[in-house]
Amino acid sequence: MEPTVATVPEPTAPIEPATTNTPTVPSESAATSESGATSDEPMAEVVSLFDRRRKKDVSPTAPAVTPLHPAFERVEATPQAPNTSATPSTDPQGESRDAHDRVDELFQRLRASSSRRVATETTKDLAKSTPSEPTSSVVSTAPVMPKLNQSVFEHRAATITAVLDAMVRIAKRVLADDENAIITHVGGKRTSLSPDAVLHDLEQQSRRYADALREELTSIAVEAARTIQSARRADLRTSALDGVVEGVAHIIVSDLLRQLHERVRAALESHVDDRDAIIGEVRSTFKQARSETLTKVVTDVAHFAYARGVFTACDTAGKVCWVVDANGPACADAEDNALAGAIRHGEAFPTGQLHPLAHDGCRCLVIPADK
């Protein structure tokens, strides 16, 4: 006998838990009585389809739990109201512009973030790489200009000032003698007007200036040597004056007499037979030399004598260094000599000099390296 399977009706309303509305499955004995016959064949187990459905309140819109023998229900979708706030615009151009704006905004944020990050990292790197305090292990190899007590230059200034006026007067007298000698020669009626006949030999003429200034030059050189050696003045007169007269003569030739000779020679060539015109040019030339050139040349000569006196007083077996007067004229060559540091006494500095003067108006000194 085939088992009887109950047909599950489609639920149209929530199933109430009341027992009166719950359909019952006919039992095995009832099925037998309805058929009016018995059979020895085993019957299939009948499972109640409503036991599980009683435990839950199934809404019409929610799918029911699938039973062992499922019953299919029709579920209709409930339309939902459109969310206008979250729905993007359907305009293609608007969407493109919005996307473009979002991309630009993203890149701007990235660039700003990158700039801030790079600046922060750079600042940190600089803070790490820059030492807050100098370490003793780092040794500078740059040349350092030697320092000197300014009292050395003050002593020189006092020494030169004491005799400078007398030196200028002596030099003016010698210069006047040279002027008178030329005017006398040109004023003669039968004298030769050739440059060799009118002008004196430069070496002999400069020697006359140096000899006239010898006493003052000796005084300056001795006072300079006493800053290095503690000896009597009488004992230093000979050694301190070594090379001073020759050096002074060279300065007078290069800075004074050569220019005078050139201008007198030009006057002789310009006025061949006009002796009065030649005399007028000669007087104008010497007047300019007295007022503009002579004092400067004599001042340089005095500073040379002092520098030479200090140099000769230094130990010949020791080392010396070139020092620059902070109040003197600036000179790149003098600074090069100072940056050379200590060298052996008697060796030439980078500019070729053993001691000042390195140029017109030089106010440097050479002193012992250990002073």
Image: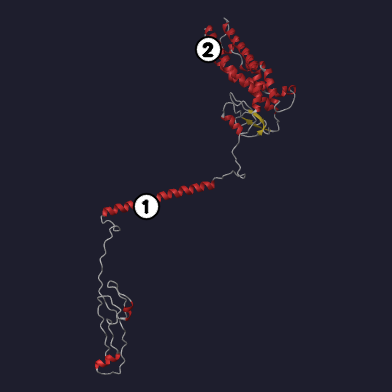
In the rendered image, the vertical position of residue 40 relative to residue 84, given as above or below: below
Residue 311 falls left or right of residue 29: right
Q: CA distance from mark 1 to mark 2?
A: 89 Å
Q: Quadrant of residue 230?
A: top right
Q: Which residue is mark 1?
A: 106
Q: Which mark is residue 157?
A: none
Q: In the drawing, does residue 240 fall left or right of residue 42?
A: right
Name above or below for residue 179 compared with residue 351: above
Furthest-top residue in view?
189
State the image quarter where residue 10 is shown: bottom left
Residue 203 on image: x %, y %: 63, 18
- Mark 2: amino acid: Ala
Position of the C terminus by quadrant: top right
The quarter in which the N terminus is drawn is bottom left
Of helix, strand and loop, which one carries label 2?
A: helix
Q: Residue at x 54, y 15 (%)?
A: 263
Residue 124 on image: x %, y %: 50, 48
The foreground one among 355 and 87 is: 87
N-terminal of the pair, mark 1 or mark 2, is 1
